[in-house]
Structures are given as C-alpha cells and as structure tokens.
Amino acid sequence: MHKIKVNLKERGYDILIGKGIITRSSALKDHVSGRSCLVMTDSNVGRIYGAYVMKALKNAGTTAHVVSFKAGESSKNIDTFGKMLRHACRAGLDRSSVIVALGGGVPGDVAGFVAASYMRGVKLIQIPTSLLAMVDSSVGGKTGIDLPEGKNLVGVFWQPSLVLIDPSVLKTLPKREIRCGLAEIVKYGVIMDDKFFSFLEKNLYGIKKMEPNTYGKIIARCCELKAKVVCADERETTGLRAILNYGHTFGHAIETVTGYGKFAHGEAVSIGMCMAANLAIQCNKFALDNKFSQELANRQKYLLQAIGLPTSLCTGISPVKIYKAMFKDKKAEKGKLRLVLPVRIGKVSIVKDVKAEDVMEAIESVVS
Ligand code: NAD
Ligand code: GLY
C-alpha cells in the first residue's frame, strides 16, 4: 500500500493507494466507526462497486446507506444536489456522519458539495473510481455543480478526511475514459516533473496493457504532485494552483465550439496542450532565452498520440470561434486571457499578455 500525506494542518489527510483497498474495513475504521455513513455514487459505479464498499463500511462498524444518481455530467446539477441533501436528511445523518463519494469526478464533486453543505459540513471520504478522479478531482477539495449557464459555477472548497484509491477498479472503466485520465497524467509531467514525463514515455507498453504496477506508480506520483500544488495554494489564491489548468482554456473552448460530446474532456485537453505548446514557441520566437523548442512540443505530441489521444483538429472547425470561446473561460480575467504555457518539460508559467495573432496561429497550427 502507498500512503501520501496532504499536509494541510487541521485539514490534512491521507491518500491510501492499494489493490483491493475499497473492500478492506481496516482502511475505513478510524474514520467511520460509530458514525452513520451515506455512500453517494452514480448508476454505473454503484451497480459494480456499491456492495463492496457497503460491506467494508459495515465491517468497519458503521450503519451505511447508499444512494445513486444517473451517471454522467448532466447529473451534476442543482436538482441532484437537492435530492442528495434530502436523502442525507431522510437517512438520518447528523453532524457526526460521514458522506462517502464513490465514483468518478461527477459523484466526487456532487457528494463533496453535499458534505460541505449538509448541517454546515460533515466529514467526507473520497473513493475515486475513474482514472481522472484518482489523479485529480478526489484530491484538493474542489467540490461543486454546474449551472445551465456554465460548468462548475457553484461550489466550495471542502477537503476530504481520507482518499482511498483502488487501481484494480480501472479494469471496468471504459477505454476512452482511461485515455482521458491519461491526458491529465501527461499534463502533470509537462507542468512539474520532467522525470515523470520520461517515465511515461518509457512505460508506454505498461500503460497500454493496463499493467497494475505501472498504474499504481503513475497514480501515486500524480497524487504527490497534486498534493504539493494544493498545499502550496489550497484555494487558488496565489495563482500556483492555476498551473493545473494547462491545456484547459484551449480545451474548454474546443468542447464549446465542437458541441459537448464530440471530444471528451481529456481529448480536448490533449489538443489544447498541443496548442499551448505551439503558442509557447510562438511567443518565444524572438526571445534570446527561448527554451520551449519544437523538439519539446513534438515530444509532448508523440506521447499523447502514442496513448491514443487526438493532437489535431480537422478542417471545418473555425479557429476564430475557438479563440472567441476562450474568453468565456472562468480563468479569463477582465476580458484578458491567462494562459499556462510550457517553459520546458517539467515547468510552466502563467502568461497574461499574449497577442491575439499568436494565439490564433497556435490554434491554426493544429488544424490538419
Ligand atoms: P464521471 O464521474 O462522469 O465518470 C466517467 C464515466 O465513467 C461515468 O459514466 C462513470 O459512471 C464511469 N465510471 C467511473 N468509474 C468507473 C469504473 N471504475 N468502472 C466503470 N465505470 C466507471 O467523470 P470523470 O471523468 O471521472 O470526472 C469528470 C468530472 O470531474 C467533471 O465534472 C469535472 O468538472 C470534474 N473535475 C473536478 C475536479 C476537482 O478538482 N474537483 C478536477 C477535475 C475534474
Ligand atoms: N483540477 C484543478 C484543481 O484541482 O485545481
């Protein structure tokens, strides 16, 4: 078993990673014994893993209930939030109770927001089951829901008390979801860890073959990196946490312009990272200390392609529309773009003053 500490003092917690951990009561005992628990999950994950988690909770000495909602981003809304709160009430949860988020980022965000709101806040345990949730959303305390007006517009920071990651549940995750998680994993290499990036390049066989050992190492390293960022900038006030948005401003714009569904989020982020890399080259074209070279951009592109992620857009998608959509990003400040651009593999910087023509050129550079 691998243990990672998120050192947030009184809000600190452990991330425990291990095969079969979700079936073990020992990992849960200290957190749930003598308290009532409500497992919140979605229709897919609840069907496959709900009973295992319920058994582990009961063996850990708690009365547990489970509630599920329809799987998918469309459930991450006010209606589901309200229903889950009312379930908590009807299940008799009190201020000492624990909410367990079981599933991908959607149950994680919804259940996290319910835990933060119910009786002004109860304990939360995250049990992520998608690769994205294991390496990103379950760690760091961002919770929330979407509005018809936009994604993630309502929510709060609410740190979990424990994160339990069982990589063996990835065997039932659809391959496309695995690839989407891998886009975020490549992102960690580019933004903060060149050695990890090289590890990914060297372990493509294990990645494609879903080798448990390889995934165990990858998930643990990503959790360490995310924990480091979160501890340095828990509430995204200093700007450091924003580096996690590498490729995302372009990615969200691609999702908006192509219509949600054509590209999954991770696929759009993959193309977005290629645009950001090309923009870094473009911005540095005339700088003497130009570090981010075409060679590095190609390394990123080849790794993404080898994983099976898209790195280009087909003609017919308007670069101008993508450019305009980028200004709708939550991270745009007073009508100005704030972009995370690579300096080298393993380091990024946040750039505020990018010229429109450079951004346009970067978008056009990936249209094939
Ligand atoms: P998701 O929760 O919808 O999961 C994707 C699909 O995989 C769903 O159909 C789900 O039922 C299924 N699934 C999950 N685990 C499974 C398993 N082990 N076996 C079989 N099927 C499984 O989406 P996601 O991609 O996990 O997360 C995306 C969400 O996360 C978005 O809403 C995004 O905004 C949010 N997010 C939050 C943060 C954060 O810091 N809070 C960070 C990144 C993303
Ligand atoms: N996924 C972005 C963050 O947690 O800040």
Image (spheres, helix red, strand yellow):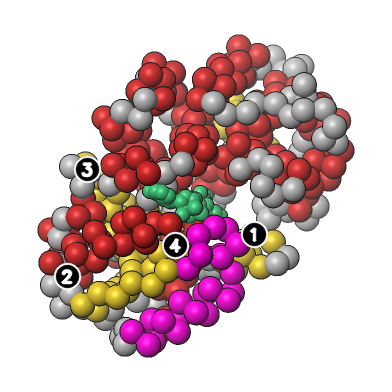
Q: Is residue 126 above or below residue 251?
A: below
Nearer-N-terminus badge (3/4): 3
Q: Nearer the viewer, residue 260 or 96?
A: 260
* Residue type beneath disc 2: Lys
| Residue 120 lies in the magenta stretch | no
Q: Which residue is mark 1?
A: 151
The answer to whether residue 9 shows anywhere in this view is no
Please state the horizontal and vertical placement of residue 221, each as a whole percent of the image: 34, 35
Q: Residue at the spot x=24%, y=49% of the render? A: 16
Q: Horizontal placement of 154 versus 127: left or right? A: right
**For this view, does 177 lie left or right of residue 59?**
right
Q: Please name whichever residue, 304 or 291, is drawn nearer the observer in this view of the structure.
A: 304
Assess mark 4: CB under 8 A from ligand 1?
A: yes
Residue that carries the numbered disc 2 in the rendered image: 58
| Residues at circles 3 and 4 in contact by the CB criterion of under 8 Å | no
**In the image, is residue 294 above or below residue 35?**
above
Give how far apart the Cα atoms at labels 2 and 3 are: 20 Å
Q: Earlier in the sequence, mark 2 or mark 4?
A: 4
Residue underneath mark 4: 43
Of circles 2 and 1, which is in front? 2
Q: Which is closer to the viewer, label 1 or label 3?
A: 3
Amino acid type for the residue under numbered disc 4: Ser
In primary-sequence order, the first of circles 1 and 4 is 4
| Cα gap from disc 1 to disc 3, whole angstroms | 33 Å
The kind of residue tagged 1 is: Lys
Q: Report the quarter where the N terminus lies.
A: top left
Q: Which mark is residue 19?
A: 3
Determine the CA span between mark 2 and mark 1: 36 Å
Q: Which residues are magenta?
A: 69-91
Question: Helix, strand or loop at disc 1?
Answer: strand
Q: Marks 4 and 1: in contact by CB < 8 Å? A: no
Does mark 1's beta carbon lie closer than 8 Å to ligand 1? yes
